[in-house]
Image (cartoon, helix red, strand yellow):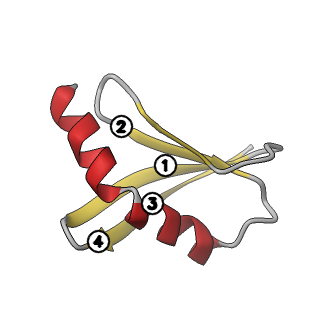
Amino acid sequence: MDVSTRIVTSEIGTITYSLVRKRVRNVNLRVRSNGQVVVSASPRVSISFIDNFVASKAIDVSKQIQTC
């Protein structure tokens, strides 16, 4: 498994997330109870696609972080 930290800027601010590369079929986004954002994706999925995906979910992520 390959893990890296990424930063994405969206219309509501910046999101820092951990990207885990592993054998999965979909791009999975999780907000852990400590507020950490983790995305898991196949190594075949491009970084730009993942960054755009996280940016598109920025409102949902920020709501989830506020409830942690």
Say what amino acid the circle numbered 3 marks.
Val
Q: Of residues 20 and 59, which is closer to you in this image?
A: 59
Q: Residue furthest bottom?
A: 48
Query: Which circle's residue, 3 or 1, is located before the other in the chain?
Result: 1
At 23% from the left edge and 47% from the top edge, which residue is drawn? Answer: 62
- Image quadrant where one finds the C terminus: top left
Q: Write down the residue under mark 4.
A: 10
Distance Cα–Cα, label 2 vs label 4? 17 Å
For the residues labelled 3 and 2, say whether their Cβ atoms are less than 8 Å apart: no
Query: In the image, residue 1 lies at what x, y percent?
Result: 75, 43
At 27% from the left edge and 54% from the top edge, which residue is drawn? Answer: 59
Asked which secondary structure carries label 1, the reply is: strand
For the residues labelled 1 and 2, say whether their Cβ atoms are less than 8 Å apart: yes
Query: In the image, residue 27 lies at what x, y percent?
Result: 65, 51
Query: Which circle's residue, 1 or 4, is located before the other in the chain?
Result: 4
Q: Is residue 33 above or below residue 39?
A: above
Say what amino acid the circle numbered 2 marks.
Gln
Q: Write down the residue under mark 2.
A: 36
Distance Cα–Cα, label 3 vs label 1? 11 Å
Q: Write down the residue under mark 1.
A: 18
Residue 31 quadrant: top left
Q: Write down the residue under mark 3.
A: 54
In the image, taking residue 52 as reference, residue 3 lies left or right, namely right
